[in-house]
Image (tube, rainbow, N blue to C red):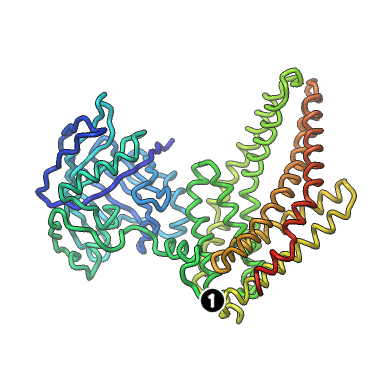
Amino acid sequence: MAETKREIERKYEVAADAELPDLTGAAVADSVDRGVTELDAVYWDTLDQRLAAASVTLRRRTGGTDEGWHLKLPVSLAEGVRDEIHEPLSDTVPRALLGLVRSRVREAELMPVVRLLSSRRAHHLLDAGGALLAEVSVDAVVAERLTDGGGTAQWTELEVELADGADPALLDKVEKKLKKAGVRRADSSSKLGRALAETAPGSRTGGGAARVAPAEGAVSSGKRAGKSEAVEQALRESVGEGPGTAGDHLVAYLRAQRDAIVSLDPAVRRDLPDSVHQMRVATRRMRSAFKSYRKILDRTVTDPLGEELKWLAGELGVDRDQEVLARRLTARIDGLPTTLLLGPVRGRLRVWAVAGRTGSRGRTVAVLDGGRYLALLDAVDALLAEPPLRPAAAKPPADVLPKALLKDYARLAARVEHALGLPAGEERDLALHDARKAAKRARYAGEAATPALGKAAKRFARRMKAVQSVLGDHQDSVVAREALRALAVQAHLAGESAFSWGLLYGQEEASAADRERELPQVWAEASRRKLRASLGG
């Protein structure tokens, strides 16, 4: 089983002969010299550096107490916060790590791209009780590029890495002391990013030239290396900074969803909380955008891709839906008095939940390892590289997006009115389920349009979400009743009492009825003419 730790660190520029300033005071009671360690790290990537572009690093390192393979995945865009996954030393990349980079690498070959030799003098910062707060190291680094002609570079840097469980505010306190000593943040947030930049063919330091370390205290400038420009651009555009046409706006939104799917892939494989849900949401948002904005993108191209996205969302749903349903039923059981729990109710639910989770979990990972999934990612990349834009894509967003929102609203209105006109029962349940899907599509369309249309689209999305929430809880009750009936049958066949399962079934029936009574008022709020008029178009 791979070992994972959260890495929170900052890097600073120092001269080759720099002495570590006094960092004691406040929370730091002592600084202990831990001596010098020689580290030899070989970084692996594709020839076109797909991992580095995504701020992902994969290395094989010897020396030190944690030699082996290390994969570092960014936790967020916050600088210096990554999850480091460790596997034992081996000659080839461990299979577990290959899976975690698969969404980035696809079928491309991984190879050694950079070798870093670091002579590290480490100091431990301790509190008054002797507990480790952070490790401060001064690294003398020699970098050798193993591709593209083999350039070299060298530099010295200071690194501050927070100890497990330590207060992140300590980093600010240490940085304040470093600044007083003339030490400033490094331009690059990673050794690999710096090595790739300074050993690249045509760079001032590449092709065998040794780099002269900057003067101590030099002020950092420029963009920090290692961040994906594509991700940053998509995020900027998704909050409304830039694209002037409807096509530009939609492509930026789709790019953000693609980036979310790819970056969430390793989290799903690691079974991190909410990762399956978030990946499924990104998949559905992209597919929904294809449907809502057919005036912008050619549907002959997007429809087949949408079907593949539907397949992926469905496969991810096997895991997610089981998880949500188990939580719902557990909460129901927790709400019952113990006198009404007849038989091994909790135990039977646990067995049911584990059995379903184990099967679906393996299936999800198998899907992410499959060729169909990789082909889907490649197809999305191809669409974003050459979007199949229609004439309306050249118009301003305000001329195109509101019409799409109003069309989705009309579709939802027809389904809600149809469902409300039916008597209670299975047919109405199905109609409400169809209305829920229409509400979700309208909500996603509003969210996609918000950066361009502002508050009007945001209000629209919020109202659509309220409708979706009521209808979603209703549908959850329908699914829960099916599961409860199956559990009651299992209990009966095993000679157990089915009383508690029947009681829970009745609660879910009552919950569904409550949602049906709530829907007309929620829909009245969402269907106000003023809401639609504010969109323009």
Q: Position of residue 433 (x, y in %)?
A: 77, 52
Residue furthest to the bottom = 391
Q: Quadrant of the C terminus?
A: bottom right
Residue furthest to the right = 423
Q: Is residue 4 left or right of residue 23?
A: right
Q: Position of residue 202 (x, y in %)?
A: 22, 70
**Residue name at image x 58 percent, y 46 percent:** 364
Q: Quadrant of residue 167?
A: top left
Mark 1: which secondary structure? loop
**Residue name at image x 42 percent, y 60 percent:** 108
Q: Quadrant of the N terminus?
A: top left
Q: Nearer the viewer, residue 299 or 243?
A: 243
Q: Is residue 432 left or right of residue 168?
A: right
For badge 1, the amino acid type reads Thr
What residue is shown with label 1?
Answer: 245
Image vertical order of residue 33 relative to residue 244, above or below: above
